Amino acid sequence: MQDDERAIRQLVATWISASNAGDTERVLTLMADDVVFLMPGQPPMRGKSEFAKAQRAMSGASIQANSEVQEVRVFGEWAYCWTSLTVFITPRGGAPVKRAGNTLSVLRKQAGAWALFRDANMLAVVPD
């Protein structure tokens, strides 16, 4: 495994760990300022500020995620990463909702470090 692939796998692990800990500030450091998230049935979420706003709207909810990297390909200063992702979101006082599916992320190297640039998230609610 090459250094860039190892660094991207570490970015994914750090993202999951920080998300599970509710550390939005840490997650924000892993993305480009002009990041775009694509999700089914939703308009694109553009930029770190929109991501942070969405996280604040979920304050009080517990998030537990698990990600398995399926593939990483690096092309100079660009890369993509395909993951299989499972997320349990438990609203305060509510029942957990399980969402699962695949993500395809485009990453860009900025100042020597990889950052999430675009993310297509195909998670769907998984019935109990």
Image (cartoon, rainbow, N blue to C red):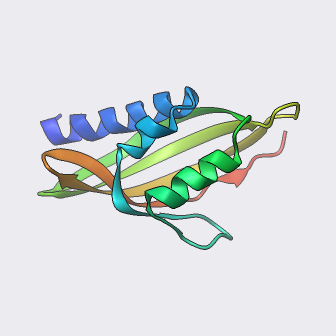
* Viewer-side residue, 70 vs 46: 46
Name the image quarter holding the N terminus.
top left
Residue depicted at 68% across the width and 70% down the height? 41
Residue depicted at 88% across the width and 34% down the height? 94
* Viewer-side residue, 124 vs 30: 30
Question: How far across and how far down the image is residue 79, in percent?
Answer: 25, 56
- The number of callouts visible is 0
On screen, residue 69 versus residue 126, left or right, reads: left
Compared with 60, 34 (above or below) is below
Compared with 31, 7 (above or below) is above
Is residue 109 visible to the viewer in this orientation of the structure? yes
Question: How far across and how far down the image is residue 116, in percent?
Answer: 35, 53
Residue depicted at 65% across the width and 69% down the height? 42
Question: How far across and how far down the image is residue 29, in percent?
Answer: 35, 43
On screen, residue 94 versus residue 54, left or right, reads: right
Quadrant of the rendered image containing residue 35: bottom left
* Viewer-side residue, 53 vs 32: 53
Question: How far across and how far down the image is residue 64, in percent?
Answer: 63, 30
Is residue 100 visible to the viewer in this orientation of the structure? no
Residue depicted at 39% across the width and 56% down the height? 105
Name the image quarter holding the C terminus.
top right
